[in-house]
Amino acid sequence: MSSNSGQTKELTPLTRAALQVVAGGSAGFVEVCIMQPLDVVKTRMQLGGGVHQYKGVFDCFGKMYRHEGIYSFWKGILPPVIAETPKRAIKFVCFEQTKPLFLFGAPAPTPLTFSLAGLTAGLLEAIAVNPFEVVKVAQQADKTKMKEAQSTWTVTKQIIQKDGFGFRGLNKGVTATMGRNGVFNMVYFGFYHSVKNIVPAFEDHTKEFIRKVVIGFTSGTLACFVNIPFDVAKSRIQGPQPQPGVIKYKSTFGSMALVYREEGFRALYKGLVPKVMRLGPGGAIMLLVFEYAYDFLQQKCL
């Protein structure tokens, strides 16, 4: 995947895996730090109300800056840093390590190789992060004021005490999460690496950087369009049910069908705009940081 691919043969598989973990974690950390302001603004707009009404994204940015200062854009950054850094490490190391399994006799990776390795990485990533997703959705669904809202640890304990660790508790909606993450990464990695290998590279570093940014942004955006029905199903399964005590949304595809029948096709794409705003540029950032960090680490280890 890099200009140093010929040199990587001198590194042991364990060393390569370790470098991939570090590069993947770095990509997650940088992406969260850069995109956190947009995530904060998205949340403010979704919450609404309060003394400051927000008319749009830029209005929200302006009012937050004027009333709360520049650092307000990074409020609540610790939880995503703690969760996303290892999550991205898992994603990238699984992708890199499973590529050889899907060569099917080909001398070099094909688009099918990239897609299947991405799918595998997404499925494994989903299993690891699903408990965090269940807790996160429970907290996001809580409409009480922030100072009255329960802590992450309290919500986690309540879920475990009430429903345990199984498919009604901390692993609720795991198949929907696997569908969401698996499909996203299949398109994300499959499109990026396939197109990057087709579109001629530039010798000029700036032009080459822009080429990768455009392909990475397109990859993240396309992946959002393809996987958002799984995201909607996941939110419905993991979130509060319409009627307390009655589980309306159960299976992944059953939930999609129910949403389609009751609310129409467009309901399967709810939340697409903020999702694209976050994961389009975020997807480009992650891929580029991983590639440059991985190349840098390889050079240092050779």
Image: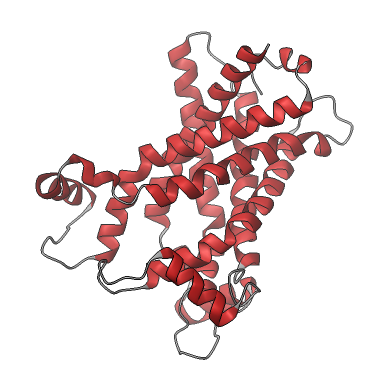
* Residue in view at x 17 percent, y 57 percent: 55
* Residue in view at x 54 percent, y 69 percent: 233
Residue 69 lies, in percent from the top left, at 15, 43
Q: Nearer the viewer, residue 242 or 294?
A: 294
Residue 189 lies, in percent from the top left, at 62, 39
Residue 272, compared with residue 293, is above or below; it is below
Q: Nearer the viewer, residue 262 or 242?
A: 242
- Quarter of the image containing the C terminus? top right
- Residue 200 visible (yes or no): no
- Give the quarter of the image for residue 99: top right
Residue 104, compared with residue 125, is above or below; it is above
Q: Nearer the viewer, residue 59 or 265?
A: 59
Instruction: Identify the residue at the far right of this view.
Output: 105
* In-image side of 150 versus 145 (left or right): right
- Quarter of the image containing the N terminus? top right
* In-image side of 181 versus 288 (left or right): right
